[in-house]
Amino acid sequence: MQQGSDSSRSPGYDPAPSSSRALIVDRIRSTGTLSRVELTQITGLTAPSVTALVRRLIDDGLVDEAGRGTSTGGKPRTLLQIRATARYVVGVHLSYDSLTYVLVDYAGGVVARWRREGPGEDSDPEEVVERIATQTGELIDRAGIDSTLVLGLGFVCPGPLIRNNGVASAPPMMARWVGFPVHQRLEERLGLPALLENDATAAAAGTRLTTSHDVSVMAALFMSEGIGSGLRLNGNVYQGAHGNAGEVGHICVQIGGPRCWCGSTGCLEAVAGPATVIAKARAAGLDLGSHRRSGVAAFAAIARLALTGDSRAEAIIKDSAAWLALGAQAITNMYDVQLLVLTGPAFAVAGTIYLPILQERILSSAFGRSVTPEVVLDERGHDAAAIGAALMMLRSDHAVSA
Ligand SMILES: [Zn+2]
């Protein structure tokens, strides 16, 4: 856990418990239970400040006293915990062929999840915002939550993003989203604060680290329709100057390689991303059923063929994995990570094929292999981006209003 709040306030890092009140809530939430004395030590705030801030948080119903901790000699300290039912946030992950919703409680627990059909090709962003507003209302109703307790929405879409605005450019199938002020329109339509985040960065925030992962530097390699990565340092994700850090899908891995939708050539995503896998599968005459277009559904159909013994599908995906292993190696060499997590909807359906190939590459080729980073599959890869966006909203100052 980060000592003090300095780095969480630095440019390029999110989120920003920028108020002392948000910082206290964040530290209790990330630890589970904390005493006032521990809060003073962790945050660097004075004891009287912590006492006053905690008193107000209890009065506002956001924090509860939760019994006493074990004594270290003096009087046992009263422990504090987040009141999980105090507030809720919604996370939404927009991709080409799916809209993933999660409802997260104030302690950071996922209480509901829902997946709906995505906008598809040539979608009208205005219509999709309308649909998101309606479906968000339905999600809250289905969970039986008082809608006045929902304090905001974290929204995730493919980058690159213009902060607090929308997408700067997009794959051809989502061309109408370029320049659309999705952040502003969501806030207007929902009447709630919204947070706009890159999908891979949010996934890094939403990846659950188990107790076996005692790490301070982890990276998420994210694959949905595209490929990206997110970096998490001491619990904070690194966003970069403009919110577009980690675009590993658009590093050149092949000089003179295929042209990418981003305008460059030989990008990892153009050489080995899901759209290329799908194109190769079609060219090889593989039966993708009704999934004729791009998107994770078509990619999943190929993964299913590969996993059920179709050697052509397996060869195409293994070739993609060999290229992605270069991206994984680049991330681990650049950032000296302790843990690399494969996450996102495409890894959720094909990760078991990719994982050993990436592990082998890291094991044999990573520069710092004397302390080889662990490479694992995220158990909730489908939802990680939506969960991460919700958790980032929970860490914001919006989340501590009375
Ligand atoms: Zn590119």
Image (cartoon, helix red, strand yellow):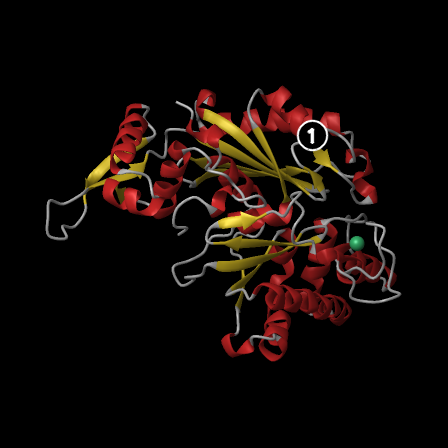
Amino acid type at mark 1: Val
Across and down, in percent, residue 297 comes to: 71, 49
Residue displayed at 46% across by 37% down: 17
Q: Is residue 363 above or below residue 393?
A: below
Across and down, in percent, residue 4 comes to: 39, 46
Q: Is residue 54 above or below residue 388?
A: above
Across and down, in percent, residue 356 comes to: 60, 72
Q: Foreground: 351 or 384? A: 384
Q: Is residue 346 above or below residue 366?
A: above
Ligand 1 placement by image quarter: bottom right
Extreme residue toward the left, this view: 74
Residue displayed at 83% across by 43% down: 172
Looking at the image, can residue 308 be seen? no
Residue displayed at 55% across by 31% down: 153
**In the figure, is residue 116 to the left or right of 393?**
right
Q: Quadrant of residue 167?
A: top right
Count of marks, rendered view: 1
**In the figure, is residue 239 to the left or right of 277?**
left
Looking at the image, can residue 204 be seen? yes
Mark 1 lies on residue = 182
Q: Foreground: 101 or 157? A: 157
Across and down, in percent, residue 123 comes to: 78, 33
Q: Quadrant of residue 185?
A: top right
